[in-house]
Image (cartoon, rainbow, N blue to C red):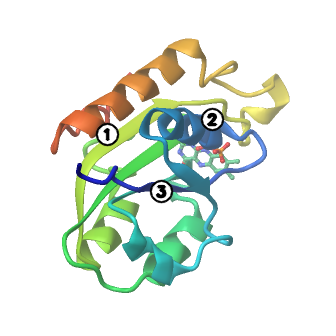
Amino acid sequence: MKPKPKSLIVCASGPHRNTRKIAETIATVLDAEVTTPDLIDPARIAEYDLVGFGSGIYMGKHHHQLLSFVASLPNVNSHRAFVFATSGFADSPLNRFSRSLTVPLNSKGFEISDGFSCRAKDTFFPFSPFGGIRKGHPDDADLQRARLFAEQLKTTQKSWNSIGDMQ
Ligand SMILES: Cc1cc2nc3c(=O)[nH]c(=O)nc-3n(C[C@H](O)[C@H](O)[C@H](O)COP(=O)(O)O)c2cc1C
């Protein structure tokens, strides 16, 4: 019998834990470990068949801790990866949030087959005085979409189904 693929999710998430909720939902479906950039040795990434990288979007990019972690990774040989994000706003075709992660990951030799993103609670100024926007997100429907994304990851090689969505 073929051994079960080993999956890891590396997630940087701020005080709202928005992206962590998505990471844990995906991990349940994949039976993956979830870790943070400061807790995993970059050299261990090669032990996994599939690695997910995700965070909230800060000033148009993934979290700096995650980007520094990716910069510290050794080169790999066609390793399968996926990326995910939560953000207050959808990205635009001119400024794809995912590029801050996919460009360095590709240059390290990762093959990024899939991506997921959803809107989530954002309390950055000027929204903070009103309690923020996208309150209550990620909600049950967002988590269900994350579950479906993870199911697809198990069965398909390429699906880019949600990156850059304009909802
Ligand atoms: C300092 C700061 C900067 C942010 N910058 C952006 C941004 O450029 N674009 C965006 O859509 N959301 C932005 N957000 C909203 C976050 O991406 C959103 O709240 C995200 O879900 C946070 O994820 P986390 O809780 O996992 O860290 C920002 C939030 C903060 C606090």
Which element is circle 1 on?
loop
Q: CA distance from mark 2 to mark 1?
A: 18 Å
Q: CA distance from mark 3 to mark 1?
A: 20 Å
Residue 118 visible (yes or no)? yes
As drawn, 118 above or below 158: above
Q: Amino acid at mark 3?
A: Leu
The image quarter in which residue 153 lies: top left
Q: How many other residues sit within 10 Å of disc 3, few (<14), some (14-19) or many (≥20)?
A: many
Where is mark 3, residue-wise?
8
Q: Amino acid at mark 2?
A: Lys
Determine whether label 3 and label 1 are within 8 Å by CB. Answer: no
Q: Quadrant of ligand 1?
A: top right
Residue 166 visible (yes or no)? no
- Residue at position x 62%, y 23% from top? 137
On whether ligand 1 comes within 8 Å of the CB at mark 2, the answer is yes
- Closest to the observer: 158 or 56? 158
Which element is circle 3 on?
strand
Dot 3 or dot 1: first in sequence order is 3
Q: Amino acid at mark 1?
A: Ile
Per the rendering, the mark at residue 21 is 2
Where is mark 1, residue-wise?
163
On whether ligand 1 comes within 8 Å of the CB at mark 1, the answer is no
